[in-house]
């Protein structure tokens, strides 16, 4: 019935939008992480903001595993940066290693 090409186009556009959202959210979380590394004011609040954003990226990736390839460089960068964040800034050695090992 000709829906194959249209469905394929919709999936490609959805993937593009998801990757864009993940990329920009990761950039924001990374920025918050860098702010924390500089030990500026409101460190606890900024840590929580970064954790919330990384967690949101993780949820987007997991909810859309059928569309996003796990080996996608943007998806991989989320997990790499999230594991460093947990390990170094949250002092959650187990959490950081778990993210790194499951990715």
Image: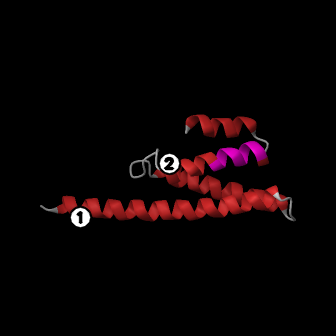
**Label 2 secondary element:** helix
- What element does badge 1 sit on? helix
Mark 2–mark 1 Cα distance, whole angstroms, equals 25 Å
* Residue name at image x 86 percent, y 63 percent: 40
The picture places residue 67, in percent across and down from the top left corner, at 39, 52
Quadrant in the picture for the C terminus: top right
> Which disc, if any, is residue 33?
none
Is 45 in the magenta? no
Residue in the picture at 61% in, 46% down? 80
Image location of residue 94, percent across then percent down: 71, 35
Q: Residue at x 55, y 52 (%)?
A: 59
Is residue 85 highlighted in magenta?
A: yes
**Residue 39 sits in quarter:** bottom right
**Label 1 neighbourhood size at 10 Å, few (<14), some (14-19), many (20+)?**
few
Is 80 left, or right, of 75 in this rendering?
A: right
Instruction: Compare marks 2 and 1 and give the one earlier in the sequence.
Output: 1
Q: How many labels does the image show?
A: 2
Q: Quadrant where the N terminus lies?
A: bottom left
Horizontally, is 22 left or right of 100 in the view?
left
Magenta residues: mostly which secondary structure? helix
* Residue marked by disc 1: 6
Left or right position of 70 against 34: left
Asked which quadrant contains residue 53, the reply is: bottom right
Q: Where is residue 9 in the image (x, y as percent from the top left)?
A: 28, 63
Circle number at residue 62:
2
**Label 2–label 1 contact, CB within 8 A:** no
- Say few, some or many: other residues with alpha carbon within 10 Å of mark 2 (under 14 / 14 to 19 / 20 or more): few
Q: What stretch is highlighted in magenta?
A: 81-88
């Amino acid at each position: 019935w000709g829906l194959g090409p249209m469905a394929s186009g919709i999936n490609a556009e959805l993937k593009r939008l998801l990757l864009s959202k993940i990329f920009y959210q990761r950039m924001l979380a990374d920025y918050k992480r860098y702010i924390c590394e500089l030990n500026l004011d409101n460190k606890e609040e900024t840590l929580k903001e970064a954790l919330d954003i990384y967690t949101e990226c993780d949820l987007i990736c997991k909810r859309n595993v059928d569309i996003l390839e796990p080996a996608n460089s943007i998806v991989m960068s989320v997990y790499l940066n999230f594991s460093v964040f947990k390990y170094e800034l949250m002092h959650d050695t187990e959490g950081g290693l778990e993210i790194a090992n499951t990715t």
